[in-house]
Image (cartoon, coloured by chain):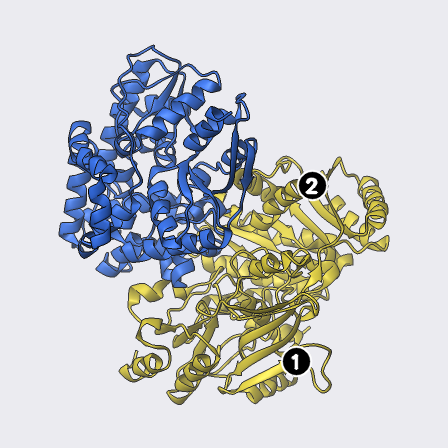
Chain colours: A yellow, B blue
């Protein structure tokens, strides 16, 4: 790294808030998934002005900037693909305001997602989007990825719960997007920014909506012999007009890993389970539970367990939220995918996923938000085996292709990131992509701020050999 | 190809491979909470260990520094979905430092010497700590404190601040077969926390246990293991295994969380030892924590009119998974109002000898506890480990409140005797 850059960064944030020794940088080369790239420096601004100062200093020296929350992302969003500076929000963890009357909270981007519900609890409120990594992941990262979670089926994802934000744009301007209260008029720039995967700028203050803790919550654990019956039940539940708070599926591989690691009372021999959570006013919930149980029974549930006590429910959710990490117990690595298909195509797509995994010789574990057709197949592999990483990426690309061809999308909640930027051409024409590039250009320089993410062929991103292979294996890149 | 200088006690490749770098551990880590640096988080430290193992980076002083700042509280293990045995990885990573270019050579050597030749030798330890006990109870202490003399010698001043009012020592003298339930007495615990042992004996007896303190037992070896001196830890483990086998005890009750966690893992520590592996497993299986033992027995309710803040000992809550039992025991006491303080399950910064080696980080963590005590104003702070007890003595003084610091056994004993 140039002495000039180091000095510029230290001038902005102070000497102790810049990391540049190789040992200190190492962990910042990765997030929760496969892509890796070492930064030249990691910088920890303490407030909006310092964020702005860092962005401007990097722009002036033409150094790429990659924002980072807790590094739990699953599409390489926080990986500094073109090296340069990682801008970490770890020092910006203040709760600025909690307003129980307006039901909002204003926080800095480095605040952990779970913290919002903790501080809201004393007012009988909570923050709805609950990614499985919620104990670690930050609200800034949630904004970037438009994070979802099991409980987003009824209540919506991050964009439905963030009212406004102060941001530092990629070009280094401080702007307020959205509002503190009612819907603003004009273009919804807030909506544009949320889910932009840290390519348009970095949120420095976030106003979130808090919602009341429901009066009654019931969690059902329905056990099935196979994934097909569980999938059919999902359609039946939704078809019956129910909108559960959460509707999650886990297959047998996942159940075994979760049970081994987290001892949450799952049946490890079952072919699949559904977690169905119903909440609201007691009388209404009671009726919904009856309906949901009927749907499960009709589609071959072998057993339905009901959890009403908070401790019992927490245990069931602990298993679900730790399920992906628990796969580390049965394989050294996993490649976690994130695709969406229409619910009507669930059974068919699951079959295709299994076929692809088998073809490549990778066991597949499935755990996903069944209610909204958001699949998370996990391919199990060992990166120490020669060529395994390249092959698992190829298999992943094929699965993404299947999702797209089923009329679905490349991501439900993890983002496109670097991981899937080249697959964008399956969904969008060159003209569409060019329009997106122009939007990105309004906020700043595409090549400099979280480069190589979301849009394909960013300047100077290069192309990793394994990605080429993955594309070739998945088929032509004409859009479908 | 590997960069570990000591292959024999190197972190196991399979252990390291278990980490899928999901990052769910970072917020559970006290040093990450304080610094905000991922390199001071479990994922960061494991990633460094992998890089050394794969010979990607040398075992530099900076790498050693990141490992040495770890408290080994194992809060990360408790939240890790993947089951990474982080404590074991860190002990073995530290074992490597013996053969690496020394970052703090003399300090490490001094520490080793003290752990091997003082702590692990009951007569030497007794000779060293008798004057400490005397000083702690003498009027001289007040004078010294007022004059601020010890503050001039950093580590001594910190130790003084942590010192309670130690009673008579408690040394294990019972012959084999004199009871069914053995009390583990440890090293420093027996010398400076004799009152806790006596209270434990009384409470266990009230629960109907036939309890005794068999001779021949000694330091559990946890401090040495955490310091990476696995050879010494194994030596101490073998001595304890032999002593407890000979004692004929059915259960071994441990009232120090750090010792209990280490002893429950004797089987792992001696897995490669053909003579001791099975015997270690058998003895480890008989080890129970004080609160764990009592949870399954009938104890009179007792009475203690106080606001009590229970603070988890890391090696009880995270390493042994015991956090409900001590609270339930306190909750059953009449007049005992349990106060949950924020971060009750986060490390207090004592962490064995950590508070002496890393005073700055230890102080930050202690200050967090002090803030909570100031806010909640408990009458009594209860914990389940001697090191934590000492740290809370200092935290209470820092908070400027009047609270007493008690071991769970002392609190229950008090409740039962005032009954």
Residue at 48 percent of width and 26 percent of height: B418
Q: Which mark is residue B44?
A: none
Do tags 2 and 1 sit on the same chain? yes
Residue placed most toward the observer, B305 or B56: B305
- How dense is the environment of label 1, judged by Cα within 10 Å: few (below 14), some, or many (20 and up)? many
Instruction: Estimate the x, y position of residue A117 in percent, counting from the top left.
Output: 61, 58
Indicate whether A387 appears above or below A420. Answer: above
Q: Which mark is residue A309?
A: 2
Mark 2 and mark 1: span between their CA atoms? 39 Å
N-terminal label among 2 and 1: 1
Q: Nearer the viewer, residue A103 or B191?
A: B191
As helix, strand or loop, the secondary structure at mark 2 comes to loop
- Give x and y (percent) for residue B12: 33, 43
- Against B300, is A440 above or below? below
Q: Secondary structure at mark 1?
A: strand
Q: Where does label 1 land, which residue?
A: A178
Residue in the foreground of this view, choosing between B207 and A25? B207
Task: Indicate the position of residue B99 as horizontal and vertical percent values.
Answer: 17, 48
Q: Is residue B55 visible?
A: no
- Say which quarter of the image contains residue A153: bottom right
């Amino acid at each position: 790294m140039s002495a000039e850059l180091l000095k510029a960064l230290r001038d902005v944030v102070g000497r102790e808030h810049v990391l540049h020794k190789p040992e200190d940088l190492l962990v910042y080369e990765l997030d929760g998934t496969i892509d890796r790239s070492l930064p030249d420096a990691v910088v920890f601004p303490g407030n909006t002005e310092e964020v702005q100062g860092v962005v401007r200093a990097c722009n002036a020296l033409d150094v790429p900037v990659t924002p980072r929350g807790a590094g739990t992302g699953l599409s390489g969003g926080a990986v500094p693909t073109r090296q340069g500076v990682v801008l970490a929000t770890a020092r910006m963890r203040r709760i600025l305001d909690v307003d129980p009357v307006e039901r909002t909270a204003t926080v800095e981007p480095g605040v952990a997602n779970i913290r919002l519900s903790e501080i809201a609890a004393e007012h009988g409120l909570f923050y709805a989007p609950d990614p499985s990594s919620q104990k670690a992941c930050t609200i800034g990262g949630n904004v970037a990825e438009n994070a979802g979670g099991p409980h987003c089926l009824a209540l919506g994802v991050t964009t439905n719960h963030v009212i406004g934000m102060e941001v530092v744009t990629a070009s280094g301007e401080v702007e307020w997007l959205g509002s503190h209260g009612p819907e603003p008029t004009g273009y919804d720039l807030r909506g544009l920014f949320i889910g932009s995967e840290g390519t348009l700028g970095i949120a420095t203050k976030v106003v979130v909506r808090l919602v009341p803790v429901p009066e009654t919550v019931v969690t059902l654990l329905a056990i099935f012999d196979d994934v097909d019956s569980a999938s059919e039940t999902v359609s039946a539940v939704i078809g019956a007009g129910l909108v559960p708070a959460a509707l999650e599926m886990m297959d047998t591989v996942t159940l075994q890993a979760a049970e081994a690691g987290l001892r949450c009372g799952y049946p490890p021999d079952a072919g699949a389970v559904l977690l169905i959570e119903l909440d609201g006013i007691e009388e209404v919930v009671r009726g919904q539970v009856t309906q949901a149980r009927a749907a499960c029974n009709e589609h071959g549930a072998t057993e339905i367990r009901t959890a009403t006590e908070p401790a019992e429910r927490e245990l069931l959710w602990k298993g679900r939220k730790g399920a992906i990490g628990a796969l580390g117990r049965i394989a050294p690595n996993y490649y976690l995918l994130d695709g969406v298909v229409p619910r009507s195509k669930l059974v068919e797509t699951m079959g295709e996923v299994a076929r692809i995994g088998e073809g490549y010789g990778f066991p597949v574990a499935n755990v996903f938000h069944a209610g909204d057709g958001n699949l998370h197949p996990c391919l199990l592999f060992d990166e120490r085996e020669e060529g395994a990483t390249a092959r698992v990426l190829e298999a992943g690309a094929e699965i993404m292709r299947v999702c797209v061809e089923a009329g679905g999308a490349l991501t439900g909640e993890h983002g496109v990131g670097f991981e899937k930027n080249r697959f964008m051409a399956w969904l969008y024409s060159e003209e569409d992509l060019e329009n997106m590039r122009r939007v990105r250009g309004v906020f700043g320089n595409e090549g400099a701020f979280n480069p190589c993410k979301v849009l394909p062929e960013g300047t100077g991103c290069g192309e990793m050999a394994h990605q080429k292979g993955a594309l070739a294996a998945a088929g032509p890149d004409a859009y479908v | 190809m590997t960069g570990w200088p000591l292959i024999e006690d190197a972190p196991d490749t399979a252990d390291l491979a278990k980490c899928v770098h999901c990052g769910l551990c970072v917020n559970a880590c006290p040093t990450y909470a304080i610094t905000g640096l991922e390199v001071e988080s479990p994922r960061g430290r494991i990633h460094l260990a992998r890089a050394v193992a794969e010979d990607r980076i040398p075992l530099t002083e900076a790498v050693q520094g990141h490992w040495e700042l770890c408290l080994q509280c194992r809060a990360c293990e408790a939240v890790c979905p993947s089951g990474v045995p982080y404590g074991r990885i860190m002990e073995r990573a530290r074992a490597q430092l013996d053969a690496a270019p020394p970052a703090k050579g003399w300090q490490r050597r001094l520490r080793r010497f003290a752990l091997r030749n003082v702590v692990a030798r009951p007569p030497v330890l007794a000779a060293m700590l008798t004057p400490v006990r005397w000083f702690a109870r003498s009027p001289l202490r007040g004078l010294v404190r007022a004059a601020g003399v010890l503050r001039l010698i950093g580590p001594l001043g910190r130790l003084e601040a942590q010192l309670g009012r130690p009673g008579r020592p408690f040394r294990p003298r019972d012959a084999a077969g004199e009871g069914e339930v053995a009390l583990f007495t440890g090293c420093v615990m027996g010398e400076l926390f004799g009152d806790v042992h006596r209270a434990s004996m009384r409470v266990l007896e009230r629960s109907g246990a036939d309890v005794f303190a068999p001779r021949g037992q000694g330091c559990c070896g946890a401090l040495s293991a955490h310091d990476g001196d696995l050879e010494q830890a194994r030596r101490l483990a073998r001595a304890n295994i032999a002593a407890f086998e000979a004692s004929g005890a059915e259960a071994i009750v441990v009232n120090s969380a750090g010792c209990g966690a280490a002893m429950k893992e004797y089987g792992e520590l001696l897995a490669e030892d053909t003579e001791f592996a099975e015997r270690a497993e058998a003895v480890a299986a008989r080890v129970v924590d004080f609160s764990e033992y009592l949870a399954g027995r009938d104890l009179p309710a007792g009475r203690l009119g106080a606001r009590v803040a229970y603070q988890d000992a890391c090696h009880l809550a995270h390493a042994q998974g015991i956090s409900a039992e001590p609270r339930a025991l306190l909750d059953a006491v009449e007049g005992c109002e349990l106060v949950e303080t924020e971060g009750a399950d986060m490390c207090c910064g004592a962490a064995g000898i950590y508070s002496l080696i890393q005073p700055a980080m230890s102080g930050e963590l202690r200050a967090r506890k002090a803030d909570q005590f100031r806010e909640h104003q408990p009458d009594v702070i209860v914990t389940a480990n001697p090191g934590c007890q000492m740290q809370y003595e200092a935290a209470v003084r820092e908070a400027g409140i009047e609270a007493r610091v008690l071991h769970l056994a002392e609190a229950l004993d008090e409740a039962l005797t005032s009954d």
